[in-house]
Structure formats: structure tokens, C-alpha cells
Amino acid sequence: MLYGRYEHTVDAKNRVFIPAKFKEALGNSFKITFNRITNKCILVYSNEEWEKLEQEVIALPRVKHEVFIREVFSNTVDVQLDAQGRIVIPQFLKDSAELQKNVLFLGVGTHIEIWSPDVLEEKN
């Protein structure tokens, strides 16, 4: 179970440290995605949790959920931790979530959300 709230900074090369509490659950390789339909944040899934989500999304009726399905899969990226425990957030995901220098990592059970503090404050 992923829980907690951690603040980190994104460097000039779009690298950010993954909080130590989350590294074990995620492993060295995992998925990040953005879904503007539900929230304006980056979603982080372990490969195991991603496979569960993938099966649920694939099972949705395509005609009714076509936009959602496209949004989920087209914005998903495989990432790997570097030797220092950082990932690179692709520019298109960083822009989509309006991330600046400071970001918040929120553990929300089965996955992690990466928020711009300003966007999260506005949402709440």
C-alpha cells in the first residue's frame, strides 16, 4: 500500500528523485502516465499495478470509452530509476501536469500521484 506525502524538486533536465518510501514498491522500472480526464497530475504505477489497470481499461466498451482509452495509453511512458534514484519526466507530461520546480508525491493506495503544489491547492 502506497501512502504519504513528499515534496521534491525537478531539476533543469526534468529529473526528480523518487521518495525512498516508494522505491521498494515501484522497483527500478515502472510506468508514468497522464490522464487529463480525471486529474491534472502524473500517475505512477508499478508494473504489477499497471498490468491490472491495463486489463480493466482494455475490458471497457471501446465505443463508450474511446477517448479515455486513448488518453491512458497514448500518454504512458516506461521509466527507469537512474543510479541516484531519479527518473526523467518527459517534457510533454511535465507540461500537461503543469509541473514546475517543486512537486508533491502523494501515495494513494495502489499508485502515486505527482502534483504541482499550486494545481493541487486549486483542486482542493
Image: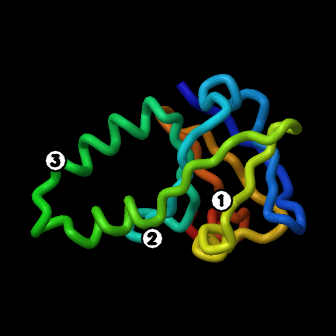
Q: Residue at x 48, y 35 (%)?
A: 47
* Residue underneath mark 2: 36
Q: In the image, 57: left or right of 28? A: left
* Residue underneath mark 3: 59
- How would you rate the neighbour count of disc 2 (Cα within 10 Å): few for under 14, some for 14-19, many for 20 or more? some
Say above or below: 40 vs 76. below
Mark 2 near mark 1, Cβ–Cβ under 8 Å?
no
| Disc with the residue nearer the chain's start (2 vs 3) | 2
Q: Residue at x 62, y 37 (%)?
A: 29
Q: What amino acid is found at the position of numbered circle 2 in the picture?
A: Arg
Q: Secondary structure at mark 1?
A: strand
Q: Secondary structure at mark 2?
A: loop
Say above or below: 2 vs 50. above
Mark 1 near mark 3, Cβ–Cβ under 8 Å?
no
Find residue 22 and report its image quarter: top right
Q: Residue at x 53, y 35 (%)?
A: 46
| Disc with the residue nearer the chain's start (2 vs 1) | 2
* Residue underneath mark 1: 115
Q: CA distance from mark 1 to mark 3?
A: 28 Å
Asked if one can make out residue 11 in the rendered structure from this viewpoint, the answer is yes
Q: What amino acid is found at the position of numbered circle 3 in the picture?
A: Ala
Residue 75: x %, y % from top left: 47, 65
Q: CA distance from mark 2 to mark 1?
A: 13 Å
Query: Residue 118 or 92: which is nearer the viewer?
Result: 92
Find residue 107 and report its image quarter: top right
Asked if one can make out residue 122 in the rendered structure from this viewpoint, the answer is no
Residue 70: x %, y % from top left: 32, 68
Q: What amino acid is found at the position of numbered circle 1 in the picture?
A: Trp
Q: In the image, 30: left or right of 89? A: left
Quadrant holding the C terminus? bottom right
Query: Residue 73 or 21: which is nearer the viewer?
Result: 73
